[in-house]
Image (cartoon, rainbow, N blue to C red):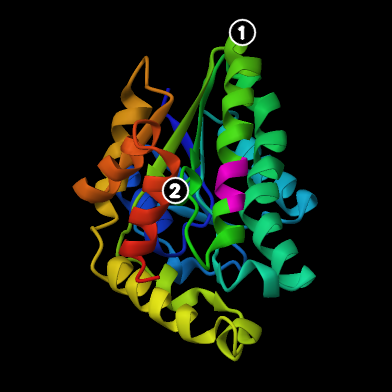
C-alpha cells in the first residue's frame, strides 16, 4: 500500500519543502495550513485547513484523510512559530500563543492521529524540535521552552507507544533559510525597553543573519524521506550547519559555565 503522510504547517518553509519532496517520491501527502489555499500546495499535495491549536480542527482534518485513504502511516509535526523578546517582558498572550502553537498543537495532532496509527498496525510520528530545544537561545526563551517541551513529550511518547509498533522520532534542525525569520513575532515591549532594547537588537541581528544564511530546507526533506523509509530509525536527528549541530552535541561534555560563556560570545552579549 502507498504510504500516507500528514505534514502540518505545509504552506511554507520546511513543511512545504518536505511535502513537495515526499510527494515527488510517490507518497500520498496531505499538508495543512490554517487557511485552505490550494495555491500554496506543492504539486501532488492535498492541502487541508487545520488550526493545530484547535482540537476539533485537527480531528476534522485527520478524519478527512481517513475517509479518503482509509489509513494514516506517518505524521510530521512541523507547524510552529516564533516570538522574539525578553522572558521578563513576555505577555501572557505571547506566552500562550507560543506554547499553544508549538507544543500543544503537536499534542493535539498526536492525540488525534494515534488511534489511526495503531489501527494501521504501526507507523511513525516525526516531531520537529530544534537545536533551540537542546540549548536555550537568548530572546527566544519561550520558543526554546516549547521545543524543550517537545523533547520531553517525545521521549515519553516513544516509550508508551513502542508496543504498538509506532516509532517516535525527533528532528532537531539548526538554522535554515525559510520564511521563519520574516514571520517571527517581535515583542514591542522588549524592542522599546530601556533595559533590554539595545541588547535585543544586537542579538537578534546575529540570529537573523544565521537564519537567512542557513541551509536549504530540502536537506530536511531528504532526511524525512530516509526516516520514513528506515525500518529502525534513530530516535533523534540533528541536522543543519556542521558547527551548530556539533556545538549542540558538545553540550553534554562542556562544563555548563563554559557553555554559557560560549553562547554569550556567539550571540554578542
Q: Where's residue 13, x and y in %? A: 39, 62
Task: Identify the residue at image location x=41%, y=30%.
Answer: 236
At horizontal 50% and vertical 52% (from top left) the residue drawn is: 136
Q: Earlier in the sequence, mark 2 or mark 1?
A: 2
> Is 142 placed above or below 188 here?
above
Relative depth, front residue between 206 and 65? 206
The local secondary structure at tag 1 comes to helix
Q: Is residue 24 magenta?
A: no
Q: Nearer the viewer, residue 91 or 36?
A: 91
Q: Give coordinates of residue 243: x percent, y percent.
A: 22, 49
Structural crowding at the residue carrying mark 2, measured as other residues with C-alpha within 10 Å and reported as few (<14), some (14–19) or many (≥20): many
The residue that mark 1 highlights is 163
Residue 115, picture quadrant: top right
Label of residue 20 in the image: none
Give the image location of residue 259, x and y in percent: 38, 47
Give the residue drawn at x 68%, y 70%: 88
Q: Which residue is mark 2?
A: 130
**Real-space Cα separation, disc 2 to disc 1, in angstroms:** 27 Å
Residue ID at (58%, 13%): 162
Q: Which residues are magenta?
A: 145-149
Amino acid at each position: 500500500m502507498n504510504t500516507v503522510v500528514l505534514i502540518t504547517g505545509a504552506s511554507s518553509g520546511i513543511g512545504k519543502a518536505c511535502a513537495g519532496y515526499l510527494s515527488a517520491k510517490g507518497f500520498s501527502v496531505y499538508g495543512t495550513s490554517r487557511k485552505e489555499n490550494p495555491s500554496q500546495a506543492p504539486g501532488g499535495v492535498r492541502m487541508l485547513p487545520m488550526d493545530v491549536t484547535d482540537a476539533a480542527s485537527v480531528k476534522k482534518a485527520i478524519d478527512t484523510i481517513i475517509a479518503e485513504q482509509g489509513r494514516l502511516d506517518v505524521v510530521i509535526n512541523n507547524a510552529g512559530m516564533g516570538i522574539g523578546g525578553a522572558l521578563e517582558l513576555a505577555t501572557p498572550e505571547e506566552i500562550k500563543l507560543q506554547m499553544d502553537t508549538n507544543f500543544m498543537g503537536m499534542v493535539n495532532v498526536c492525540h488525534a492521529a494515534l488511534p489511526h496509527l495503531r489501527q494501521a498496525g504501526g507507523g511513525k510520528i516525526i516531531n520537529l524540535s530544534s537545536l533551540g530545544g537542546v540549548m536555550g537561545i537568548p530572546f527566544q526563551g519561550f520558543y526554546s521552552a516549547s521545543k524543550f517541551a517537545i523533547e520531553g513529550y517525545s521521549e515519553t511518547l516513544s516509550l508508551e507507544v513502542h508496543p504498538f509498533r509506532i516509532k517516535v522520532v525527533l528532528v532537531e534542525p539548526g538554522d535554515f533559510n525559510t520564511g521563519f525569520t520574516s514571520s517571527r513575532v517581535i515583542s514591542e515591549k522588549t524592542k522599546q525597553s530601556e533595559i533590554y532594547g539595545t541588547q535585543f537588537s544586537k542579538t537578534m541581528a546575529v540570529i537573523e543573519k544565521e537564519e537567512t544564511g542557513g541551509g536549504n530546507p530540502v536537506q530536511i526533506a531528504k532526511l524525512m524521506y530516509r526516516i520514513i523509509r528506515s525500518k529502525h530509525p534513530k530516535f533523534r536527528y540533528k541536522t543543519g550547519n556542521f558547527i551548530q549541530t556539533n556545538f549542540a552535541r558538545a553540550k553534554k561534555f562542556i562544563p555548563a559555565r563554559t557553555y554559557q560563556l560560549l553562547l554569550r560570545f556567539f550571540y554578542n552579549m
